[in-house]
Image (spheres, rainbow, N blue to C red):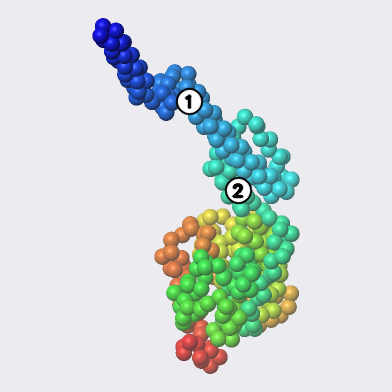
Amino acid sequence: MGDSQGDEKEENLNELQSDTKCKTTQIPSFKDFLDLSKYTYSFSNTNEHKNTKTEWKTSNHLAKQNRLNKVSRECLILSDSRSLGKRKHKKLSSSVFPNKNQCHTTIASNTSRYASSSIYASFPELRDSLAHNLICIFIGLNPGLTTSISGHAYAHPSNLFWKLLHSSGCTPRLFHPTEDAELPNLLGLGNTNIVSRPSRSSKELRRAELDAGVSALEDKIRMYKPEAVCIVGKGIWESIWRTRNGRNISKCLFHYGWQEESERMGVDKGKCSSWKGAKIFVACSTSGLAANLKLVEKETIWRELGIWVQERRKQRSKQFQDAAEL
């Protein structure tokens, strides 16, 4: 019996050890599922992240500067090509990166320099709208690019010519540029220019071109013999006056409106003729780029001409009897 009790105790001891071992091996653990060491704070990792971010910003900034540098080079090339040898090529320093405003200024300034006729050689000249013995012929500077493409006078939407023509009373209604060829027969009005070649702006013409066009303009007026001519722009009249007098007109002598009787245009001094030449009226420019005068001031200048044109049309009512019905 003693042996059986000893065996029983030994068996119980073995069972207890076995249970203890099982409990030890069954303790829950996330060792194979979650590595917490990856989420511990590391000073070296932070620096590495900052360096990566700094490198990205630096590379992005350099790429932007390179793009600006490329645009700046293109601006300088355009500027030098338009100067036609008047200026030396500018050198671009590799350490200087001009901003966008500097580049924009370079491009904008190019539009105010002389441009040879070859640049706009593909743009056609504008055909005159003329007839003999008209009441008034309007003399413009030269065709703009929009006018050249459309084939009609003062065709750019920003040009005030047709609006001022109507508000002044020169025309009984607002005409469209496509109706320019109808003005001579309907209203006794015509259009021509002192320079025939097109350009983007008046600043792309040389003063010598305007002066050279005066002689041909005088011949044209002498041929068609209008009662008056309207100079559409101060610069045109300055060129005519300079060609006649050999010097520039002074500020005290210049004025808008009707000029002196001695300043008639198209006078044939070499032959005896009953025609005394066309009276000259100087009006302000109608270009949308001409902002030196307010609209009210422009309308006042043109109104003086409109009153005279209306009166002359009434006196020649038999010739223009349908004008009032337009």
What residue appears at the point 51 percent right and 65 percent down from the top-left corner?
158
**Residue 164 % position (x, y):** 48, 71
Q: Is residue 293 above or below residue 185?
A: above
Q: Which residue is mark 2?
A: 107
- Can residue 257 be seen in this snapshot? no
**Residue 45 % position (x, y):** 47, 22
Q: What is the secondary structure assignment of the residue under circle 1?
A: helix
Q: Is residue 145 left or right of residue 25?
A: right
| Crowd rating for badge 1 (residues with CA inside 10 Å; few <14, some 14–19, many 20+) | few
What residue appears at the point 60 percent right and 63 percent down from the top-left corner?
236
- Can residue 181 be seen in this snapshot? yes
Q: What is the secondary structure assignment of the residue under circle 2?
A: helix
Disc 1 residue type (three-letter) = Lys
Q: Nearer the viewer, residue 212 or 58?
A: 58
Q: Is residue 218 above or below residue 73?
A: below
| Disc 2 from disc 1: Cα separation | 41 Å
Of the residues under marks 2 and 1, which one precedes in the sequence?
A: 1
Q: Which image quadrant for residue 19?
A: top left
Disc 2 residue type (three-letter) = Ile
Quadrant that contains the N terminus? top left
Q: Is residue 302 above or below residue 72?
A: below
Q: Nearer the viewer, residue 280 or 261?
A: 280
Mark toward the viewer: 2 or 1: 1
Q: Which image quadrant for residue 265?
A: bottom right
Q: Are marks 2 and 1 in contact (CB under 8 Å)?
A: no
Q: Which residue is mark 1?
A: 50
What residue appears at the point 70 percent right and 61 percent down from the top-left corner?
120
Q: Is residue 323 left or right of residue 143?
A: left
